[in-house]
């Protein structure tokens, strides 16, 4: 499920009571986000963290949930017992993982005490025990590994060299699967491709989105990213200054597994398909590279199946 559960939404709304100027704080956070600045520059008080939760948490939750659904498809037997949410902020990825996998023991860390305080309040409201630690993403060392490690919208705040060092640390703490989700911007995609190469060299297998371990075949100005649509509440619309009742969150991601876990997709739909009464055209990333696969309407079973596919879906052929 891509949208935040009602219980989590209710907790954040309750925590927001009595805090003034949240929309203005949200605007400053969004501007910092667009400028690829750090959250620590604009999240210093509890009201800032709550504004972030109201405005950014729904989209982050939706993107992470979509990626975790893909993980389940690629590795249906994977049943993690322990989670590390690195650069957790208010714990968005951890709460999404908890909805996806039952009985998940959660450890969250962030360098921002204000975010950790909010994560603690959310955990208490959910009656969901979580270990909360204060560490920097670029230098953490916990002395143990975790079945599932998530890092959502956190690497984007680091410099290029620090991003690769953080990826090394994330992988060192991963005994099963590492999930990284980043903004769906060309800059973040390029950095994620450097992380991807680093993790493959370290012995990781990319389960998604890629159907291969070769270099990304896309050529600039194209880049690999996906989109998830989420509904906006009236409150969310006010916080974002929006008029539409929905939001399309663009994101890029990696799901990287230790050997023996899961199987990658044969191909991936990397742009919205084009459909008419004669055919469905599927832009694919396949093991041999980027291709346009056309399914004619005369092949009725394949045509019917192709019509159900969307941007980001796996294609079995």
Image (cartoon, rainbow, N blue to C red):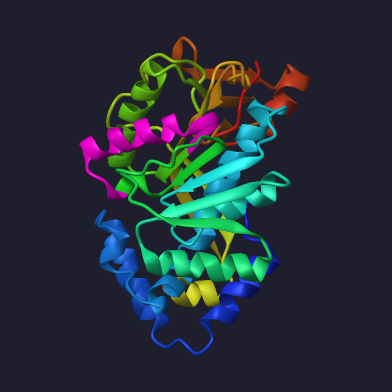
Visible residue check, residue 207? yes
When the figure is inspected, residue 266 is found, relative to residue 177, above or below; the finding is above
Within the magenta stretch, is there residue 159? yes
Report x, y in % for residue 309: 64, 33
Visible residue check, residue 223? no
- Main SS category, magenta section: helix
What's drawn in magenta, residue-wise?
157-179
When the figure is inspected, residue 207 is found, relative to residue 223, above or below; the finding is above
When the figure is inspected, residue 7 is found, relative to residue 155, above or below; the finding is below
Report x, y in % for residue 290: 44, 18
Is residue 202 toward the left or the right of residue 42 in the image? right
The foreground one among 46 and 188 is: 46
The foreground one among 206 and 199 is: 199
Task: Tell me the residue at 61%/27% (across/down).
Answer: 314
The furthest residue to the top = 288
Task: Tell me the residue at 30%/43% (across/down).
Answer: 139
Q: Quadrant of residue 138?
A: top left
Report x, y in % for residue 171: 43, 30
When the figure is inspected, residue 163 is found, relative to residue 284, above or below; the finding is below
Is residue 301 toward the left or the right of residue 285 in the image? right
Task: Tell me the residue at 50%/58% (across/down).
Answer: 132
């Amino acid at each position: 499920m891509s949208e935040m559960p009602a219980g989590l939404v209710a907790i954040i709304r309750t925590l927001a009571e009595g805090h003034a100027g949240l929309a203005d704080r949200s605007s400053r956070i969004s501007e910092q986000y667009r400028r690829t600045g750090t959250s620590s520059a604009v999240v210093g008080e509890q009201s800032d963290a709550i504004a972030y939760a109201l405005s950014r948490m729904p989209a982050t939750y939706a993107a992470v949930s979509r990626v975790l659904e893909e993980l389940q498809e690629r590795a249906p037997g994977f049943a993690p017992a322990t989670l590390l949410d690195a650069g957790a902020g208010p714990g968005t990825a951890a709460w999404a993982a908890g909805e996806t996998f039952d009985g998940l023991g959660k450890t969250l860390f962030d360098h921002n005490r204000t975010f950790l305080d909010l994560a603690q309040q959310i955990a208490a409201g959910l009656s969901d025990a979580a270990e909360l630690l204060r560490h920097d993403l670029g230098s953490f060392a916990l002395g143990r590994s975790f079945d599932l490690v998530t890092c959502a919208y956190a690497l984007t705040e680091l410099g290029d060299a620090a991003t690769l060092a953080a990826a090394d640390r994330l992988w060192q703490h991963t005994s099963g699967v590492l999930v990284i989700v980043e903004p769906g911007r060309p800059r973040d995609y390029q950095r994620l491709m450097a992380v991807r190469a680093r993790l493959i060299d370290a012995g990781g297998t990319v389960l998604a989105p890629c159907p291969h371990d070769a270099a990304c075949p896309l050529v600039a100005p194209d880049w690999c990213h996906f989109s998830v649509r989420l509904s906006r509440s009236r409150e969310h619309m006010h916080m974002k200054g929006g008029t539409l009742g929905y939001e399309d969150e663009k994101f890029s991601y990696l799901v990287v597994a230790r050997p023996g876990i899961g199987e990658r997709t044969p191909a991936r739909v990397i742009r919205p398909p084009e459909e008419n009464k004669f055919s469905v055209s599927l832009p694919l990333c396949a093991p041999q590279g980027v291709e346009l696969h056309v399914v004619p309407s005369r092949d009725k079973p394949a045509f019917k199946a192709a019509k159900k596919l969307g941007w980001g879906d796996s294609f079995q052929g």
